Image (tube, grey):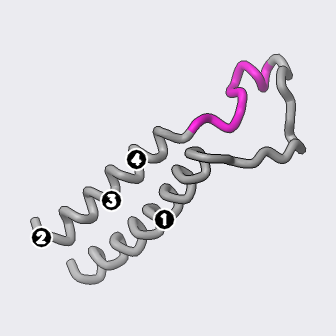
Amino acid sequence: MSALDIIFLSVALIVIILSLLQGGKSEGASGAITGAGLNIFVKTKERGSEKVISWLTFGFAIVFFTLAILVKAIG
């Protein structure tokens, strides 16, 4: 296992953890069935830590896909 593989796995774990830390943006299946809280066209902004986690997830996802291409090209 090379250093690039270890970095790739570490970034993958970070993306998974950051994705799990993000709050749900919808009411879920029960809200869809009952029609409760139907805010399709309401514009909600992320603020504070939600915004930071969202940007970190986006950044690490880009790094993840770049590393995936590198691992495939090198290996």
Q: Amino acid at mark 3?
A: Val
**Residue 30 appears left or right of 43:** left
Residue at the spot of label 3? 11
Q: Residue furthest front?
A: 48
Residue at the spot of label 4? 16
| Dot 2: element | loop
Say which quarter of the image contains residue 74. Answer: bottom left
Which label belongs to residue 59?
1
Q: Residue at x 69, y 24 (%)?
A: 29
Residue at the spot of label 2? 2
Q: Residue at x 85, y 22 (%)?
A: 35
Q: Amino acid at mark 1?
A: Gly
Q: Earlier in the sequence, mark 1 or mark 3?
A: 3
Q: CA distance from mark 4 to mark 1?
A: 13 Å
Q: Earlier in the sequence, mark 3 or mark 4?
A: 3
Q: Position of residue 68 (x, y in %)?
A: 35, 70
Check whether the beta carbons of the residues at disc 4 and disc 2 lie within 8 A of each other.
Answer: no
Q: CA distance from mark 3 to mark 4?
A: 9 Å
Mark 2 closeness class: few <14, some 14–19, many ≥20 residues within 10 Å: few
Report the span colored magenta.
23-33
| Dot 1: element | helix
Q: Residue at x 32, y 59 (%)?
A: 11
Please say whether residue 26 is one of the residues in the magenta stretch: yes
Q: Position of residue 60 (x, y in %)?
A: 43, 62
Q: CA distance from mark 1 to mark 2?
A: 23 Å
Q: CA distance from mark 1 to mark 3?
A: 10 Å
**Residue 56 appears left or right of 12:** right
| Dot 4: element | helix
Q: Earlier in the sequence, mark 1 or mark 2?
A: 2
